[in-house]
Image: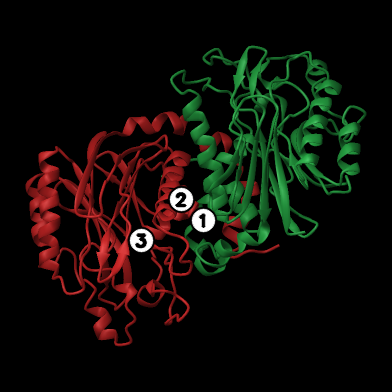
Chain colours: A red, B green
Amino acid sequence: MRKWVIGGAQMGAIQKNDSRERVVERMVSLLDQAVKEGCDLVVFPELALTTFFPRWYMEDQAEVDTWFEREMPNAATQPLFDRAREHRIAISFGYAELTPEGRHFNTSILTNRQGEIVGKYRKVHLPGHVEYDTERDFQHLEKRYFEPGDLGFETFDNEGTLMGMCICNDRRWPETWRVMGLQGVELVMLGYNTPSVNSQNRGEGLAQRLYHSELSVTAGAYQNATWAVAVAKAGVEDGFPLMGGTIIVDPDGFVVARTQGEGDELITAGCDMERCQFGKKTIFDFARHRRIEHYGRITSQTGVER
Amino acid sequence: MRKWVIGGAQMGAIQKNDSRERVVERMVSLLDQAVKEGCDLVVFPELALTTFFPRWYMEDQAEVDTWFEREMPNAATQPLFDRAREHRIAISFGYAELTPEGRHFNTSILTNRQGEIVGKYRKVHLPGHVEYDTERDFQHLEKRYFEPGDLGFETFDNEGTLMGMCICNDRRWPETWRVMGLQGVELVMLGYNTPSVNSQNRGEGLAQRLYHSELSVTAGAYQNATWAVAVAKAGVEDGFPLMGGTIIVDPDGFVVARTQGEGDELITAGCDMERCQFGKKTIFDFARHRRIEHYGRITSQTGVER
């Protein structure tokens, strides 16, 4: 399938004591709206099933683990998978994954329109910190609760379209987009939970944060000639504001749909995958133009070296 | 020196029969204006000394070579170097370089405020094609007249600030910015000659072209926490329109100065290099956040591979 109607299902705040079942009801409601709008694929945010728990400092691993899913689908999410299969809509959403081996990842999955999981991604670029940071206005403990993803940036053939995923902070790293671009990706899906203020710089507010997010997604889409869908969890969670700014971006880097608010809100766009071809065959024809002999530092060093 | 007043010296059209001497007079005039505005550094465009000759198909190498400079400075450009030294202004500009060994590069140089060349860059990402292309509305023969740069993306300590250069199409490639970012670059300078329409897509006009240029420069600046100056040669050259859009961008990815027209026009901004530190120490602290084990494709393959 080369022409997809894609939905970006922004979700409003999820409070600390909201149950998964209640959240999944909201996701099903967004899915039902997507059915009416003719969607073939709906993308939900990062950690879609719970509040953004990495803002809370926890020392008890058993308590931490209550935020994680041990299997997918599970009892709480089965209604979402069932409804998606019923309506032949592919879905992608994020959740905290606890593996049988006891490993913790910030994960997203992708299904086909038959409700089968055809792709999994585990967040590579974990922001934040490991220990309690007294200098921040609030905590961002992703480096404490998750290990970096071990699957890389794979792409998945979903009914004839090449799809990839990344999560939140990954979108700010051009390496994320390029590794998928070098596989010929045609659609990049991502969710995020992005605070409306910078925990380390109170002067950096909502407008600046939205700009940086959109800048990263539009540049990644343009420079790899791919569609992109970036979906927020937004609103005030337990007193902490998350920004909205859900967008669908075309392979030329232009925003074609955008949410207006910070609540549950669906945006849609008709996305013809053939539109990726012009960029991939001309200015971003990598085979003709890239000069890897000059890129060595990108993979040979992690930090800054003179 | 950590606080620089930087000038972006956009240049209007240069016709095919304009002499280097006449062009250098215009550059000196822009430099004199920069003196009045207190500049410490002025950046001129790519191939600043001549018309954008790669739009012309030539078979006679002797004719091609008339567009190239055999030494720098040379008699035509000496007045510019002299005036810059006199006023203690560093300069950067682009020109077609013919080496003593007979090699051809699309080059830019950087001087210190004493008028000494402290950095040289040779364009890595050559756009366009080698042979006459009947399917284009006009030719873009950079791949015919130049070989890809052999110096990589070096950075140069210019009086205590780390500066790098790239040229035109290089700005669209995140690898360009990242290789300099991995050296800790604080200021990236680039010039361009960008046609106002896409030679392979008549529907892609000025607004879209300006958007793509600014998107690439602002994303590169933000994602590497560096100042950036992108300077156009603009206006209608021998019947072919080049876009303007000269900008100075801060290390947060925001445009702080912008030209209004398509003629000779100077913009300036006070650029405090310490402003690069916040990004480099937080969200883009590469040493803490990059995961090179997942970036392998970027340097191991040139084109798309599944």
Instruction: Give the alpha-carbon distance from disc 3 to disc 1, as whole Å.
Output: 28 Å
Q: Are marks 2 and 3 in contact (CB under 8 Å)?
A: no
Q: Position of residue B298 (x, y in %)?
A: 53, 50
Q: Label 1, secondary structure: give it.
A: loop
Q: Would residue A210 be found to the left or right of residue A266 on screen?
A: right
Q: Position of residue B259 (x, y in %)?
A: 61, 33
- Which quadrant is home to the N terminus of chain A? top left
Q: Picture quarter containing residue A71?
A: bottom left
Query: Would you name the residue on which mark 2 appears?
Result: A179
Residue A56 or A2: which is nearer the viewer? A56
Say if B168 sits above or below B145 in the image. Answer: below
Looking at the rendered structure, the kind of residue marked 3 is: Thr
Q: Position of residue B56 (x, y in %)?
A: 68, 15
Looking at the rendered structure, the kind of residue marked 2 is: Val
Query: Residues at marks 1 and 2, common chain?
Result: no
- Circle count: 3
Residue B301 visible in the displayed image: no
Q: Chain of mark 3?
A: A
Mark 2 or 3: the one toward you: 3
Residue at the location (24% across, 83% down)? A63
Q: Are marks 1 and 2 in contact (CB under 8 Å)?
A: yes
Q: Would residue A186 be found to the left or right of residue B35 on screen?
A: left
**Mark nearer the N terminus (2 vs 3):** 2
Query: Residues at marks 3 and 1, common chain?
Result: no
Query: Would you name the residue on which mark 3 appears?
Result: A194
Looking at the rendered structure, the kind of residue marked 1 is: Gly
Query: Would you name the residue on which mark 1 appears?
Result: B296
Q: Picture quarter containing residue A52?
A: bottom left
Residue at the location (68% across, 50% down)? B270
Residue at the location (56% across, 48% down)? B220
Instruction: Give the alpha-carbon distance from disc 1 to disc 2, as whole Å.
Output: 8 Å
